Image: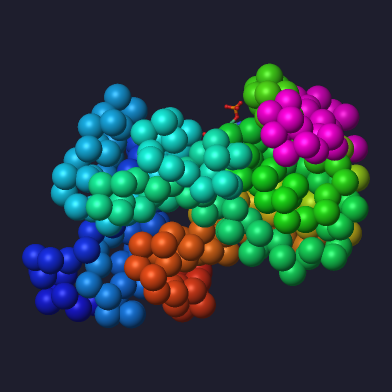
Amino acid sequence: MNFENKINHNSNIVAVIGHPIKHSFSPLMHNISFDILQLDYLYLSFDVPSESLKDALKGMIALGIKGFNVTIPHKEKIVDFLNDVSEEASVIGAVNTVVNENGILHGYNTDVAGIVETLLPFKDELAGSEVTIIGAGGAARAALYSLIRHFKIEKINIVNRTEEKAERLKEYFSAKMLYNGIKAYDLTPPDLIDVFNRSKLIINTTSIGMSPEEDDSPTTIPGSFNKDQIIFDVVYNPLETKFLQLAKSQGAVTLNGLRMFVEQGAKAFELWTGHEMPKDKIYKTLQSYLGA
Ligand code: NAP
C-alpha cells in the first residue's frame, strides 16, 4: 500500500456507518481499489448506534465526507434524513449508499445492481419461473425489486421467521410494483420442502449460516433441493455456507454472495469517484482472503 498517499491532508474520505460495524469487508474492498487505481481516497468505518444517526449525518456534512455506505440498522431509517433518493431506493424503502454533494445527501440502493449482476447469466432460465426468497429484511426487499423489475418471474414466495413481516412485504410490493404473484410463508412448517423444491431459484437473504454460525442453514433437509435449481446465498463469509453445501450435494447450481458484494460496492465506488472499480482483481483478492 502507498502510505504517502494516505497522509495527504486533502484526501477524499468515504466511509461506512452501521452498528455493529466490525464485520464489514467494505473498507478492505474500497481501500485496495483506491490503491490499485492510485486514487487519493480513504475509506473508514464508523460505528453509529441508532440514536446517533441524525447527528452522524450532520457530522458527515460538516467534515466534508464525500459519501458513505449504510448498513444494519440504518438502511431504512436514513431515508427520512436524505435530500433525495433514487427510484430503486424509494420503492425498496432502503438506502445502502449516500453521495454528499456539497451538503446535499443523495441516497441509492446498489444492492439491486449486486443481485441483478449475479443472476443475469440465468435470465432466460428464470423467465416464467417460481422463485423463493428467504428473509424479509433489507436484502429481501432489494431481491424482490430486482426480480420483479429485471427478470420475468411468474411467482415469488417470501419465507420468513416472522411471518407477519413476509405478509407486509407481500402487501407492499404487490401494491407498489403492481405485481400479484407473491405468496408469504412462515419459515418453519414441513410443507416448505415442496415450496423450496418447486422453486427454480432460492435466495437466502438472511444472515443464517454466516460466520461464526457456520453450522446453521435455513433448511437442513436435502429434499429441499434438486439438480435443476439455482441456489443463491447473499452471505459470502464463509464462501460456501451449509445451505449452499446441501444444495450442491443435490446437484443444484450454487452462487455465493461475493459477486453481489463486489458489484454493489463497485456501483457505490463509481457514484463517489466517477471511476470503475477493478472488479475482477477485487473479486479474486477477496476470494482468496475469505477462502484462506
Ligand atoms: P435485516 O434487514 O436485519 O433482515 C434480516 C432478515 O434475516 C430478517 O428477515 C430476519 O427475520 C432474518 N433472520 C435473521 N436471523 C435469523 C435467524 N437466526 N433465523 C431466521 N431468520 C433470521 O438484514 P439485511 O440488511 O436484509 O441483511 C441480511 C443479510 O444479508 C446479512 O447477513 C447481510 O450481511 C447480507 N447482505 C449481503 C450483501 C452482499 O452484498 N452479499 C448485501 C446486503 C446484505 P425476522 O424478520 O424474523 O427478524
> What residue sits 33% from the left and 80% below the top?
37
Residue 255's quadrant in the figure? bottom right
Does residue 179 show up magenta in the picture?
yes
Whole-percent x, y for residue 123 in the image = 79, 63
- Counting labels gives 0
Whole-percent x, y for residue 272 in the image = 36, 62
Task: Find ligand 1 in the image and state its quadrant.
Answer: top right
Residue 77's quadrant in the figure? top left
Q: Is residue 195 left or right of residue 84?
A: right
Compared with 36, 16 (above or below) is above
Residue 29's quadrant in the figure? bottom left
Q: Confirm whether residue 27 shows in the render.
A: yes
Whole-percent x, y for residue 156 in the image = 80, 40
Q: Nearer the viewer, residue 228 or 70?
A: 70
> What residue sits 41% from the left and 31% below the top?
80
Quadrant into which the N terminus falls: bottom left
Identify the image's colour scheme: rainbow, by chain, secondary structure or one colour: rainbow
What are the residue bounds of the magenta stretch? 171-194
Q: Nearer the viewer, residue 153 or 187?
A: 153
> What residue sits 35% from the left and 68% below the top?
273
Does residue 213 show up magenta in the picture?
no
Q: Is residue 13 left or right of residue 153?
A: left
Q: Nearer the viewer, residue 271 or 28?
A: 271
